[in-house]
Amino acid sequence: MKEFGIKLKKLRETKNLTQKELGEILNVRNTTVSAWEKDIAEPPYEVLKQLCLIFEVSADYLLGLEE
């Protein structure tokens, strides 16, 4: 899922959200968001669904399965 972090960061910045703000929306710490963006960790399934809703993209897009 190497593309995940890059896509997440780009989507977050497009919505003008900080890591802290996104973390607050998802009820996680900003360090968790940072770890996802650096591809150090992956979000759980439920958070992935929330990210898709927040950024209006498919899970396939976030996971790098489609452009």
Image (cartoon, grey):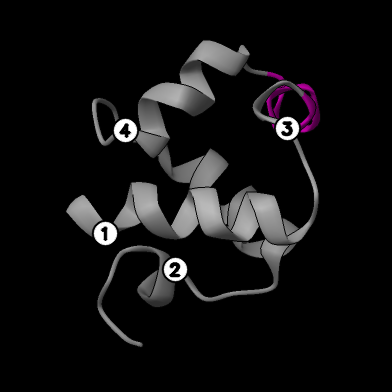
Mark closest to the chain's N terminus, 3 or 4: 3
Q: Which residue is mark 3?
A: 18
> Is residue 43 left or right of 40 when viewed as pictured?
right
- Marks 2 and 4: CB-CB under 8 Å? no
Residue sitting at x 78%, y 57%: 15
Q: CA distance from mark 3 to mark 1?
A: 19 Å
Please, what is the three-letter code of the amino acid marked with disc 4?
Lys
The x and y percentages for residue 61 are 41, 75
Q: Which residue is mark 2?
A: 59
- Marks 1 and 2: CB-CB under 8 Å? no
Please, what is the three-letter code of the amino acid marked with disc 1?
Glu
Mark closest to the chain's N terminus, 2 or 4: 4
Residue sitting at x 68%, y 24%: 23
Q: Quadrant of residue 21?
A: top right
Q: Quadrant location of the C terminus?
A: bottom left
Q: CA distance from mark 3 to mark 4?
A: 15 Å
Mark closest to the chain's N terminus, 3 or 1: 1
Residue density around tag 2, few if under 14, some if 14–19, many if 20 or more, within 10 Å: some
> Is residue 46 left or right of 42 when viewed as pictured?
right
- The residue mark sitting in front, 2 or 4, is 4
- The residue mark sitting in front, 1 or 2, is 1
Q: Which residues are magenta?
A: 21-27
- Marks 3 and 1: CB-CB under 8 Å? no
- The residue mark sitting in front, 3 or 2, is 3
Q: CA distance from mark 1 to mark 2?
A: 12 Å
